[in-house]
Structure formats: structure tokens, C-alpha cells
Amino acid sequence: MPKSSNKNRDRLSDSTGKEIFEVHPVILGGDPTDPANKVVLTREEHIKAVRFWNRVIAEERRKNVAAEQSLE
């Protein structure tokens, strides 16, 4: 196993009271099984990250709707 994977595994194993979060969401092409796509966040960090990605995803959905409507 590569060193970076070992570091991520060790980091993830010390996650008591924390949230494991995907750095690049699966819905946007992130790898759900790659340990390098995981990070351990405090509850407060997790809330901020979720809010950020929810805004990004909402914007992408708006773009897709607008693109589909322009094709009609």
C-alpha cells in the first residue's frame, strides 16, 4: 500500500467524535472507495464543508436545468 494510503488510513482510524467526509463528492465524480478522497473533520468543519458542497451542487443543477431549457 502506498505511503499516502497508510497516512489516510491512520488518520481515518482516529476519527472518534468526528465525521469522515469525501473531499470530492461522488455526485461530482469523486471516488467513493479511494482513501485519498476521505478526510476526518470535526462536526463544525463538516457542517461548513457540507454547506459549501451543497451550494456547488445546487449551482451545477441550475446550470443543467438552464442548459436543458435552452435546448427546447
Image (tube, helix red, strand yellow):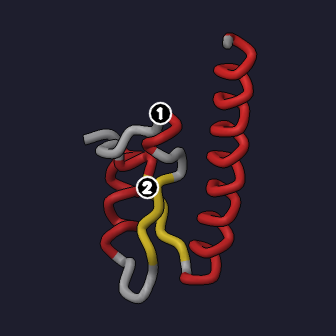
Say which quarter of the image contains residue 8. bottom left
Q: Is residue 66 left or right of residue 37?
A: right
Q: Secondary structure at mark 1?
A: loop
- Comparing 53 with 61, the one in front is 61
- Comparing 70 with 25, the one in front is 70
Locate the C terminus and report the quarter of the image it occupies. Answer: top right
The residue at the point 43 percent across, 55 percent down is 38
Task: Name which of mark 2 and mark 1 comes first in the sequence.
Answer: 1
Q: Residues within 10 Å of mark 2 (few under 14, many from 20)?
A: many
As shown in the figure, which amino acid type bears the numbered disc 1?
Gly
Q: Nearer the viewer, mark 2 or mark 1?
A: 1
Residue 49, how many percent across, how many down? Answer: 63, 64
As shown in the figure, which amino acid type bears the numbered disc 2?
Lys
The disc at residue 64 is none
- Comparing 24 with 62, the one in front is 62
Q: Is residue 54 above or below residue 34?
A: below
Q: What is the count of numbered marks?
A: 2
Q: Secondary structure at mark 2?
A: strand
Residue highlighted by disc 1? 29
Give the spatial CA distance, label 2 vs label 1.
Answer: 14 Å
Locate the N terminus and report the quarter of the image it occupies. Answer: top left
- Comparing 43 with 55, the one in front is 55
Q: Is residue 37 left or right of residue 42?
A: left
Q: Residues within 10 Å of mark 1 (few under 14, many from 20)?
A: few
The residue at the point 38 percent across, 78 percent down is 15
Residue 26, how many percent across, how many down? Answer: 43, 43
Give the farthest residue toward the bottom: 17
Residue 35, how many percent across, how many down? Answer: 36, 49
Residue 70, how many percent across, how many down? Answer: 74, 16
Residue highlighted by disc 2? 38
Q: Is residue 54 above or below residue 60?
A: below
Give the farthest residue toward the top: 71
